[in-house]
Amino acid sequence: MFRFIYKLIPNWFKICYYKIMGGRPWSKGYSTFKFEYIKKALCDKELMKKFKNFEPLPKGYGYALDSRVVEYPWVLSRISTLEEGNILDAGSVLNFKEILESKVFKNKKITIATLSPEPDCFWQKGISYVFGDIRNLLFKDNCFDYIICISTLEHVGMDNVLYAKDLKYREEKIFDFGKAILELKRILKKNGNLFITVPFGKYQNFGWFQQFNSEMVSRTLEIFQPQNYQIDYYKYTKKGWNISDEASCRNSETFDVYKTKYFNKKSSLDFDPDFAASSRAVACIKLIK
């Protein structure tokens, strides 16, 4: 009931409330503000060109916002010029109105694979939904032209009860992301593109996800064995998100918002001075089969 009522509140009001209350990550209105921010970024031709060419971003870009503000533009800038074809969203991260309305998806068939039904469904836009584990999908070999896997691999084999409401997904199989990579390769067409993004830096295990380090990124390449690949790194600082490199991101740490006083009544912890919303670095990987 609360979700239904909240959806009736105008977005401008949610955004105003979010700003008035200090613009704190994950507070009321944060998601609305973030997706409006991302929507504007996707419509900004000059900015999208910077993402496509891996060029420096404007100062302050994405300040106090999570890595989605770089992950979505990075991926969409790379499929904007691709021919029509079948796209698999492995993880259901595209399943937002602001994202699916992007012009880059015109003439492309989208299938979303996720563990369980989403609160919002866009079947009226021609989106197909398949429920299952991306370590074991029911698709035939070589059936997708492009696969998008945004911030999903880090959850594979971890405690996913939050998403699936099924105790069988309360796991701690930290190397099972490799099984997902092999499965995605199997269903990807020859010369097809797999786009992966993961939080990057020091290895951290939060139970429900893990932050990838350099060894895990290298393992991803070894498992997939691409004919070609590209890895771009973005880093968050008090100046916002911008391009970076592996060496500069290697010691980055994710800020655990759930340890703050806003989520834990027994805590006195506030946000760090840089106002990081979550991960402070992300690896964006393009693999060609």
Image (tube, rainbow, N blue to C red):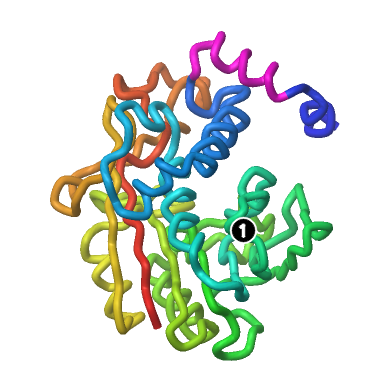
Q: Quadrant of residue 236?
A: top left
Please say whether residue 63 is one of the residues in the magenta stretch.
no
The amino acid marked with disc number 1 is Ser
Tell me which segment is drawn in magenta: 11-23
The relative height of residue 195 versus residue 260 in the rendered view (above or below) is below
Is 17 placed above or below 259 here? Answer: above
Q: Can residue 249 be seen here?
A: yes
Q: Residues within 10 Å of mark 1 (few under 14, many from 20)?
A: many
The one nearer the camera, 78 or 113, is 78
Query: Where is residue 141, by image quadrant?
Result: bottom right
Depth check: give the residue in front, 103 or 9: 103
Residue at screen point 48% across, 20% down: 24
Q: Residue at x 78, y 31 (%)?
A: 7
Instruction: Looking at the picture, tell me which residue is in the foreground, 254 or 108.
Output: 108
In this rendering, the answer to whether 119 lies above or below 34 is below
In this figure, which residue is indicated by the disc labeled 1? 92
Q: Main secondary structure of the magenta part?
A: helix
Position of residue 262 measured from the top left corner of the image (x, y, whole percent): 51, 21
Q: Residue at x 80, y 60 (%)?
A: 123
Locate residue 47, reporting x and y percent: 40, 41
Picture residue at 38% right of the left edge, 49% below the top = 49
Image location (x, y in percent) of residue 247:
13, 51
Q: Residue 19: say if magenta.
A: yes
> Residue 83, relative to residue 200: is it above or below?
below
- Assign a secondary structure to mark 1: loop
The C terminus lies in which quarter of the figure?
bottom left
Residue 260 drawn at (x, y percent): 43, 25
